[in-house]
Amino acid sequence: MPDIIQLLPDNIANQIAAGEVIQRPASAVKELLENAVDAGADEIKLIVNDAGKSLIQVIDNGKGMSEIDARMSFERHATSKIKDIEDLFRIKTMGFRGEALASIAAVAQVELKTKRAEDETGVFLEVENSVVIKQEPIAATNGTSIAMKNLFFNVPARRNFLKSNAAELRHIVDEFVRVAMAFPEIFFSLSSNGQQVFHLEAGTLKQRIVQILGNNYNAKVVSVQEHTDYMNIYGFVGKPETAKKTRGDQYFFVNNRFIKSAYLNHAVMNAFDEMIAKDSFPMYTLFIDLDPSQLDINVHPTKQEIKFEDEKIVYAFVQSAVKHALAQFSITPTLDFELDASIQSLDAVSKPFTEENKSSATSSSLYSTFTKKNQAHFVESKSELKHWKDFYEPTKKVSSTELQVDSNETKKDFDFLDAHNSKFETENCFQLHNTFIILPTHNGYYLLHQQNAHERILYERFIAAVDGKPMSTQQSLFPVTIDLAPADAVLLNELLPDLQHLGYMLEPFGNNTFVIQGTPADVVQGNEKVAIEKMLEQYKHFSNDLKYSKREKLLRSLALQQAIKPGTSLTEKEMKGLVEDLFNCTTPNITANGKPTYLEFKKNELNKMFGR
């Protein structure tokens, strides 16, 4: 039998290794940007075409490379950062394994121009399929320009797994933002297909946060700053009112390296305990600096997951620092959380109780009524209290007793609008707690949840719209512009074709700005910007759920965002319209997300509850 084990050819070994490091265009963007940072650049430009599939180019003004270093940089495991095993635990740079350029050269056509300040000429290299096919001296500016073209040109199967350009560009924006956020002292720009997406001037961390996440954070962030011998933590957290339904605006950096850590995220969430809703997420951009020997960054090819030597200390430190910051800036409420904000701002609460106030209060008849002994029978006669009974007079209310009905008894037959034998009386429906609609029937009643019901109605309307029955658009008399964070602008561009079917007329206006020319008829004039911002926020809430298509996420987002919210008072006509629209739906009993739109309560079941 012949021997069967043999060494892989270098180009195939490189392609296999590249699979761990370069999974998509965004992976290459991350590696190239980090190399530029390590080169000491203070100006870094990223240029992409076709979401990085045809071109990714990074230009920096860093220290550049010599001719030999330029050639060596494409060899596997070629690095200037590691000389012995101990160096692995003293890493302070972004890259260190020496795999990035070798991996990129294995799956793309690469052109490198580089020049050091002390050299008269630069060097030009052309690499394809891990082979240097051209090397020559050139005139060049100080620094490095590296362009990778036609990603996965020699691995077509990998190329077929790439997503749409819009989806891949969003991944690129994510990686770009993570590096740019970590180094606010460096100028960064990103251009896509000739259009500038980001232009980030060098500045402070707060300025960089506002540049990336939007002006709405300018006055709504709190500084975090704690220093100890073991570790330092600094950065910003958003005030509670900026919490969103998505995790998007959350960044952790350890020694300036972006990391993902559910453990540390939990520490921040704990610091916000009872200050934000359970299903909301606070904004934070936090940096932890500690001795590299206290952590292991070499546990994952992307280096986004790390191990701390003592996780519990780091957790406690993060939680404590955020809590301290919130308290220090008077974000932590001093009154009961249930107390209305408008009450907290009243003079009686916020101002001191002076002697003058005290004498005025004690001289009133109301004060004497409640302070004299044996005077209870006089209370009602006092003019200031004569209407107190009105609060307790019975009005046309329905008991809010929570009724439990076996789900098996909840009827699911949908022949509700039989013209000859209607099962309910829409004329007699009424609203309870501005949230529910009570609908009497000949055999009990239906209890509808107005938001859930409206979500189902809107969802089916939207399906019909994108399937060929576009919704009518209400033209804006005075078109308004909406400025978005760059990442949101990329997302909105991706959704424009479907939004047009749903009644939105939006036109890109350059520099992450859009003109709103028209909206669906049911969007209140003057509320267009809020509607679009909330839709984008809801869309991002679904973005991690792989089982939904892009269109499905959009339809669900719009249904959730536009549905009538609890607490909204409805007229009799509006209630009747809502009921009839619901039971004309294909699937009236549940929302798109599986929540019930109504429950049926039968007369015999109600009698059983009362022992009858």
Image (spheres, rainbow, N blue to C red):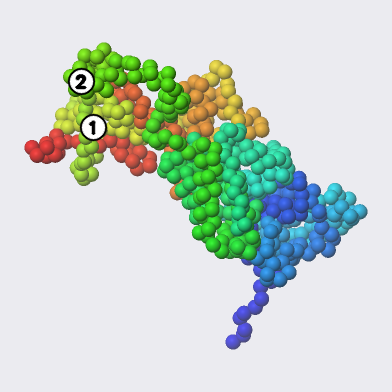
Q: Quadrant of residue 20?
A: bottom right
The three-letter amino acid code for the residue at tag 1 is Ser
- As measured in the structure, the alpha-carbon distance from the residue carrying label 1 to the one carrying label 2 is 36 Å
Q: Which residue is mark 1?
A: 400
Q: Quadrant of residue 200?
A: top right
Depth check: give the residue in front, 359 or 155: 359
Q: Is residue 267 left or right of residue 287?
A: left
Give me the residue at 57% from left, 58% from top.
305
Q: Is residue 475 left or right of residue 30?
A: left
Q: Is residue 385 above or below residue 110?
A: above
Q: Is residue 89 above or below residue 271?
A: below
The quadrant of the image that shows the C terminus is top left
**Residue 517, percent across and down?**
56, 23
Q: Are marks 1 and 2 in contact (CB under 8 Å)?
A: no
Badge 1 or badge 2: first in the primary sequence: 2
Depth check: give the residue in front, 415 or 69: 69
**Residue 6, percent across and down?**
65, 78
- Binning the other alpha carbons within 10 Å of mark 2 as few (below 14), some (14 to 19) or many (20 upward) gives few
Depth check: give the residue in front, 229 or 536: 229
The three-letter amino acid code for the residue at tag 2 is Gln
**Residue 236, percent across and down?**
58, 43
Give me the residue at 64% from left, 61% from top.
292
Q: Is residue 378 above or below residue 435?
A: above
Give me the residue at 71% from left, 40% from top.
203
**Residue 534, percent across and down?**
49, 33
Q: Does the rendering let one see residue 207?
A: yes
- Binning the other alpha carbons within 10 Å of mark 1 as few (below 14), some (14 to 19) or many (20 upward) gives few
Q: Which residue is mark 2?
A: 375
Give me the residue at 72% from left, 41% from top.
202
